[in-house]
Amino acid sequence: LQASRDDCPQTNIYLSRSELPRNTTMKFQCTTLFWLLLNATASSFATPSNYQSKSVTTSTSTVSLPFVFRGGSNSGSQLSAAVESPSQSMVSTENLDLLSERGRAAVQSLIDSDVDSSQSHVYGDWPEAGTQDEDKKRLAEQLADLDASYPGGLSTYLSKARTLLKESADGMNPFEEYEAIVPEGESLSFDGEGTMSFSEAEQLGIEAMPGAVFVLVAGGLGERLGYSGIKLSLETNLCTNKCYLEVYVKYIQAMQYLARQKTGRDDIRLPLVIMTSGDTDPLTRQLLKDNNNFGMDDDMVSIVMQDKVAALKDGAAGLALKDGDRWNVQTKPHGHGDVHHLLYREGLVDKWEKEGRSHVVFLQDTNALVINSVVPTLGVSKAKGFHMNSICIPRLAGEAAGAIARLEHKTDPSKSLVINVEYNQLDPLLRSQGDCTGDVADETGYSPFPGNANNIIIEMGAYAKTLRGEDQGVVLEFVNPKYKDETRTDFKKPTRLECMMQDIPKLFQKEMKDTANIGFTTFDRWFTFSPAKNALDAGVEAADKGNIAPGTMSSAESDKYIQNQRKLKFAGVDLDVTEPEDLVKVAGIPVTAGPRIILAPAFGITQEEIVDKVKENNKISKSSSLVLDGHHLTIKNLDLDGALVIRAGNDSHVTVDGLTVKNKGWELVENDPSEEYEETVAIRGYTMAKPEAQEYIINEPGNFVIGADGELKKVD
């Protein structure tokens, strides 16, 4: 029976008989014409002994309609039409009545949107009411949560998933209509030459500091590092034992302090938003509580928590249920791209715009070096008028790291955009254009496409306009299923839709068209990039293959010392800067032999500050360890061979002049393989022995001098 949706308005019809057991009715769409045909032909059906199915073809799909007859003549057969909800045809009224209003609505929505029965394993075959009722409620509530947490609901999520999974199975090339070229950007060097003066960029960045807000993406645990806690709680180094979160907070406070000093405005306050997940949220809040926000005002710290999304079991986007629990949908992280929608949803962007904020700085959780590049990148953004500016590093050709590229559309310039392109997509794209050589190095020895460090700065006006668009900050998603076989239908393990923070240029393009100005700023690796992301064993394996950047906690700590060596060297200090060939293996990881230097944010977040605070003739031996912390701390004529710590409060003005320090100092001690260690120690493979150090802690307001005799003296 054919019923065209163009003939007349459609009506949802459910064929049933009062004697039928529940779940034997089927929904189909028909027209008034179909009703006439139904009445005319109902008495002509032959009477089967029990049950048979007929197919009715509509304009949208073919469905089986069960007709049931209980013996007797044809004239005794009665076929009635009963209007029910689709969920009642799949889940009994008694079971639906068990559920809360939101749970019932979620189940009904799932059934209504299930056009191909790919979700029937979720709502089908429920036992009758009175059996596993609490489990049914649990599943319904979870479906309601998944529906409420995703913009457009669970049906929108599954619809997107079906489209993306089909494209994946078909092997669709997302860049088929594009060519990649190097975008506009700047290259800065702290101690070398760049396309723009570092000091010029820094000065412009200082001017932009009062309008900055910070967003820290911290949704992951440290499991990949061999650590069960949150990564923000990991110690960045063993000289000060400061964790990542404290380092970031102290940097923001130092920027706030400097902005106040430069402008004379005491009302400047820089806020921090932390994006957590269900895994990290309670531990992050506890870390802040235990440490009094590390000195940050309560109203300047906000937390937004991202939700997980449903896992998918096959190419039809069927929801994946947990093994051994059919009443629980597996969930997975959606990705750090959630941060944009969360900031919009919580009203933070509107609030910031009303406050006159100018830029949003997005940081990742375990790359302590990135704070070095924030001020100069702000300066480049201001100079170039960038709406979005990606912090980048030189990238080796073929390196397994994303690259920033301008994708020029071959036929429609309005679709061109500057965006991150993953390494496994970049090489095939470059091989399909120009000289077809692929991802190769230029005369510098690096790829001309800068490596994406996944830290970005976005101009507030453009950001607010983009988030208010129809997508509300939901960046374009992708799927990355691992298929069981060449049929590309079933997965080795459940997948999900994912999104990345750095993919927001797709929304800029949509909302701002060709007015979107997106670029990059490249820095030396030593200055801005050394993430901790790999376990010690994986790092040792990489190091054995010649990798001097294995991405472990120990290599990240070592790189922190090395970047401070370079800063003090630039300021005129006599010390040895560790080069790649100077690294020594400790617990199997190449690290610096020293000196180990920590310059706290309060000592200086700009090149200008460090040069101004380090004067005359200073000398530091290779075996030394040095910690400097204080806004008003000046170092002159220091001769250090050992360990020295100087911390000065905000109102303490301290000058070190002519001090000589010689002591046993600090050293790294490898873990004993026969011993058990706490996770924080085991992930490094070593501890730091601190037999002797000279230490000055000054919190009293006033002016102080530490002279050649080593005595701290207050002066008028």
Image: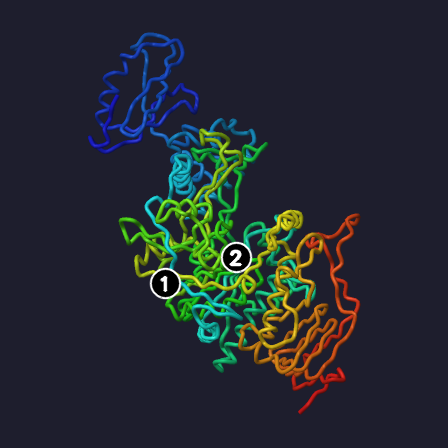
Q: Is residue 226 visible?
A: no
In the rendered view, would you say 620 is above or below 442?
Answer: below
What numbered label is drawn on residue 217?
2
Task: Give the answer, above or below, for where 490 lies relative to 181.
Answer: above
Which of the two discs, 1 and 2, labels the residue nearer the N terminus?
Answer: 2
Whether residue 600 is visible: yes
Asked which secondary structure carries label 2, the reply is strand
Q: Is residue 410 left or right of residue 632?
A: left
Q: Quadrant of the image for the N terminus?
A: top left
Q: How is the image coloured?
A: rainbow
Residue kind at label 1, given as amino acid type = Ala
Residue 447 numbered tag: none
Q: Amino acid at mark 2?
A: Val
| Residue 669 image offset from top left, x and y in percent | 76, 58
Say if 460 sits above or below 130 in the image: below
Q: Residue furthest front?
A: 443
Q: Position of residue 243 (x, y in %)?
A: 64, 62
Q: Which residue is mark 1?
A: 462
Residue drawn at 47 percent across, 80 percent down: 263
Question: CA gap, disc 1 to disc 2?
Answer: 21 Å
* Closer to us: 134 or 530: 530
In the image, residue 330 sits, relative to residue 376, either above or below, namely: above
Which quadrant of the figure has residue 465? bottom left
Image coordinates of residue 598 in percent, x first then y, are 64, 69
**Quadrant in the rendering for residue 616:** bottom right
The outermost residue toward the bottom is 716
